[in-house]
Amino acid sequence: MQRHFDEALEQLKQKLLRMSSLVEQSIGSSIKALMDRNAELAYKVIKADDAVNMLEIEIDELCLKLLALHQPTAGDLRFITSTMKINNDLERIGDLAVNIGQRTLDLIKVPPLKLKINIPKMATAAQAMLKDSLNAFVNKDSKLAYEVCKRDDEVDDLNHEIFMELLSCKPEDLTPVERVIDLVLVAKNLERVADHSTNICEDIIYMVDGKVIKHHITD
Amino acid sequence: MAIVEVQNLNLAYGDFPALKNVNVHMEKNTITALIGPSGCGKSTFLRALNRMNDLIEGVKTTGNILIDKEDILDAKTDLVSLRKKVGMVFQRPNPFPLTIMENILFAPKIHQTAQKAEYAVIVEECLRAVLLWDVLKDKLHKNALQLSLEQQQRLCIARLLAVKPEILLMDEPCSALDPIATERIEELMWMLKANYTIVIVTHNMQQAARVSEHTGFMLLGELIEFGRTKDIFTYPQDQRTNDYITGRFG
């Protein structure tokens, strides 16, 4: 017998998947806009965030309703509480996509930096972490979630590398200074995408295995 | 320290096996909840702890139930002493049709465990323990049946305390009570825990989650899973426990 509660849980899952798909698209488009210096796409990303914000509220409300009306336990409780947290991380990733879009709009106004920095590599790594964390959620795959968590260090290292490269720019590359700052911020935003993807994976591990791995407490 | 240690407990009503190889231990001054669908054996298990099942014809019990390290299934066990040590509270409050005072003094008088001069102190102590003293101190000669259901249930617990038990068995003690009265009895259980070990059988899963520190899930006479309540209700190890407490069967 399909219960009313099961239908509501399925509805919640579908909403979170929709949210994931919107956010993944936003991050992808923001990176593409940055690489292609495409202002129109950057504006689209900024505009698309409204839908993500609305969906975040809808998901939160549904979670609260299910908690209040059904007093879920065990697997259901872990699913709903994890969904609330993942929802929050996804919304933040949406904001990061907007930030990258805004930085892109600024960067387009000035000639590109001649110095080769590794933002594409970092963007690919962060985007892959996000994609895999969402796959781990869909498939309840805690093994993949663990693996994604481990990849966070790579993105951190790339962020540090980019920061050092920009710090050691020749004086002529430092002008206009906003360009360098924007690039530092883009790298920082990508690094935060990886952090939020890691958070999502930690929540998936709790949801699937009931284990708390946050802050390395099980190390 | 384990006050109850159950080893390989099997119990059958004639040919029907009601408990199958149950092993569990319960710590002193804790509350343990037993949950499971109707007919899973949780009340049978509860009654085994003070051998109330002996009153049913054709019951066969094997294994060991150590209470304070003594096997209560031993033929030499003094059942009267056992049931003083391990008292029981039932689903529906069952005060005697006597006064409040007489209810509490019933057992001390029968067992002759107290002098007349001590009666007043016993009544006050027992009623205080269940938070009824302030309400009833001027009505001790009132018939107990005139009390509200919640007060009757509290009185039944007070009556139990008069024989100085160590373990309180509670079989659905709140099923006849409204939510407010239920909450008050649950609060009372938390208070009593300081001095007694409590085992409660309940169909109300939220109640088990609220009041107990350990929970056992029973199914078809087996103790499927036993652990900290927090763990059972967030991450049960057995799929059957998960399915039961999330309402997917039972």
Image: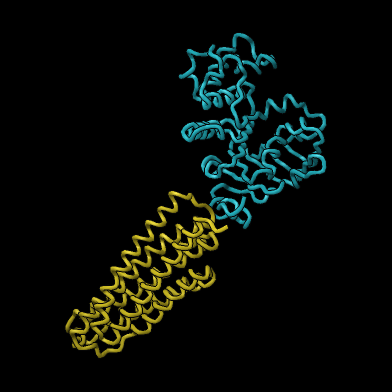
Chain colours: A yellow, B cyan
Left or right: A59 with respect to B162? Answer: left
Q: In this view, which residue lies farthest toward the top?
A: B117
Nearer to me, B230 or B4: B230
Q: Quadrant of residue B116?
A: top right
Q: Is residue B177 above or below residue A38?
A: above
Q: Quadrant of residue A194?
A: bottom left
Residue B70 shows in this picture: yes
Residue A215 shows in this picture: no
Q: Position of residue B69 (x, y in %)?
A: 73, 36
Residue at 51% across, 42% down: B210
Q: Position of residue B123 (x, y in %)?
A: 56, 16
Q: Quadrant of residue B101?
A: top right
Q: In this view, which residue lies farthest toward the front?
A: A1
Q: Position of residue B141 (x, y in %)?
A: 54, 11
Nearer to me, B203 or A160: B203
Nearer to me, B1 or B25: B25
Q: Position of residue A92 (x, y in %)?
A: 33, 67
Q: Quadrant of the N terminus of chain A?
A: bottom right
Q: Is residue A133 above or below residue B16?
A: below
Residue at 31% across, 71% down: A96
Left or right: A24 with respect to B89? Answer: left
Left or right: A187 with respect to A209? Answer: left
Q: Is residue A120 above or below residue A197?
A: below
Q: Is residue A165 above or below residue A75?
A: below
